[in-house]
Amino acid sequence: MMIKATDLTKTYQMGPNEIRALINVSLSIEAGEYVAIIGPSGSGKSTLMNVLGGLDRPDSGRYFFDGEDVLAMNDDALAAFRGSKIGFVFQSFQLLPRLSARLNIELPLVYAGMVPGERRRRAEAMLVKVGLGQRGDSRPSQLSGGQQQRVAIARALASEPRLMLCDEPTGALDQKTGREILDLLEALNRQGSTVLMVTHDLQIASRARRIIEMRDGAVIRDGAPQ
Amino acid sequence: MIRTSDLFWSAVNAITAHPMRSSLTSLGVLIGVAAVIAITSVGLGAQSSVTSAISGLGSNLLIVTSGAARGGGVRLASGTGSPLTETDLQALARNLDATVSGSVRGQAQVVAEGTNWNTQIEGVTANYLVTRDLKIAEGRDFEDSEIVSRRKVVILGATVTKELFGSADPIGQRVRISNTPFEVIGVLAKRGQAGFGMDQDDIVLAPIGPVRSRVVGRRLRSSAVSQIFIKASSSDALEALESDAKEILRETRRVREGSEDNFSVQNMASILEAGRSATQTFTLLLGAVAAVSLLVGGIGIMNIMLVAVTERTREIGLRKAIGARSRDILVQFTLEAVLVSSLGGFWGLLVGISGAWALAQFGGWPTTIPVWAAPVSLLFSSVVGVIFGALPAWRAAQLHPVEALRRD
């Protein structure tokens, strides 16, 4: 079992209101799965993704990744965990505008301490993998939205993570481009990457092999798409 | 763990991404460092010119002049009282373990073949050159017998030699001072300008006797000496020598117990010290004012770095998401501040040095560029970067990745 989380609970204080983002959420994910988390906004799906990705800590609960107790890690260990085990893909791409596509892809490897030559080779390979072999020197502003998201996916893949966490990866793209990105993610999944995707779009989620549906901080359904 | 070279290059990248902003930010530090260097150079220059002006009078030296004249409770300037005499001089020479000489001074026209020059004539006793640290460039010093026998011989300063003889050899030539012929026996080594624009080479030395009678004239008693110079063998002996000299002089000049000295003894070492400490205070004060501008430069850096952290919040969130530790973010932003600041320090060093040079070249100010200028300004500007970059960098490092990524 790659991910084993039990009784994750997290509440936010927002002004006078207490928002219960996660209420006793438990789930397990095997390596190689393709899982979509769906639910309306405010259902806690983003919070769950942040907790699973090591970006945020729950108030209580237990979370093991490959048998390692993630919640017992200190902040530095957690940063290393994010860098080596998780590849994030965000709705708004989050590419650094100053850097070329290749340097953006190299960034996680920079923090992993990889030497420049090897970084470059790895980034070039990732560019080919996402179908942008010739665009390594382009700045993000010179690329289309779909191409930028491909660069972001290549960046997520660069450190060869165990888990790809995609937060509304097609949310900022038109339908056609969005489909191409989903095709890419599925292809990567077939090649062995574990993909966990957060979306509010049922149509997109239905392409996953497993759907976890959330509402008001709790999992209300977990299984294959109907 | 991120490699140090990558940290460095990411800081360089961030700085070159906004060239205008980065240069304006470092301008604050540049001005501060340049001001500190230029001002200290001027201050140190003033200090060494004061030092050379005073030590130009001779080192380890006591200068005795007659006291102030008194008339009905009014005291006149020092030197107006009853003059010093050969008796005083001899008493000092006999009883002190030091070299003693005396002189009288006058202004006169010196005439050589076809030309003339108005200069200061110094009538001197034996040992004068030794006590005043004067050196002979050509020819020879006076012999004691020439002083005693009042021979009409002169030693010329470099300026006088040039004015009267040009490049010709003056030794053995004759000059006329107050219609009296003198033979040139030597030329003094060049001493250059003293402080206050005084030319120390515009002088003629002659035995005290002829000068007293021919140049200074009737105003002086036949044994009068206007100044007595006492040269100690070392600066440590100076204070003891000063009190001994006073005691001897009170005796020879018959100063009654309890009444004031009718002469004055100036210790050149203490005057030197006073002059030095005055210019030092002045340098420190101006340097402190300049350092304030460095502080302002530092605040400018902090300001821009805070803006940069706000602007780059999402970048910071992203970096954390892909594996950057808080420490990596902290170091990256601190390094950016340090680079901007030390860039300003480097250019400030060049501007400060050129400024000091220009002041010396075109303003005629004596400047001394301190040797520590380069290391200190580079070190100091880096420290400014660390101090004023720390708060913004710490803020960046503390950002929560989830919230940072969500920020627009």
Image (cartoon, coloured by chain):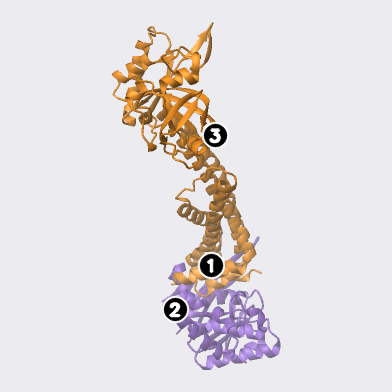
Helix, strand or loop at label 1? It is helix
Q: Chain of mark 1?
A: B
Question: Count of labels shown?
Answer: 3
Identify which amino acid the numbered label 2 is placed on.
Answer: Val
Discs 3/1, front: 3
- Residue in the picture at 52% in, 61% down: B334
User: CA gap, disc 1 to disc 2?
Assistant: 18 Å
Task: Where is residue B299? Give x, y as percent.
Answer: 59, 52
Whether the residues at callouts 2 and 3 have beta carbons within 8 Å, the answer is no
Identify which amino acid the numbered label 1 is placed on.
Answer: Ala
Discs 2/3, front: 3
Helix, strand or loop at label 3? It is loop
Q: Which chain is orange?
A: B
Identify which amino acid the numbered label 3 is placed on.
Answer: Gly
Indicate whether A85 appears above or below B343: below
Task: Where is residue B4? Give x, y as percent.
Answer: 45, 69
- Tell me, yes or no, if residue B284 can be seen here: no
Helix, strand or loop at label 2? It is loop
Give the quarter of the image for residue A204: bottom right
- Tell me, yes or no, if residue A30 can be seen here: yes
Indicate whether A34 appears above or below B193: below
Q: Which chain is purple?
A: A
User: CA gap, disc 2 to disc 3?
Assistant: 86 Å
- Residue in the picture at 43% in, 11% down: B260
User: CA gap, disc 3 to disc 1?
Assistant: 76 Å
Q: Which mark is residue B114?
A: 3
**In screen coordinates, is B20 left or right of B378?**
right
Q: Which mark is residue B11?
A: 1
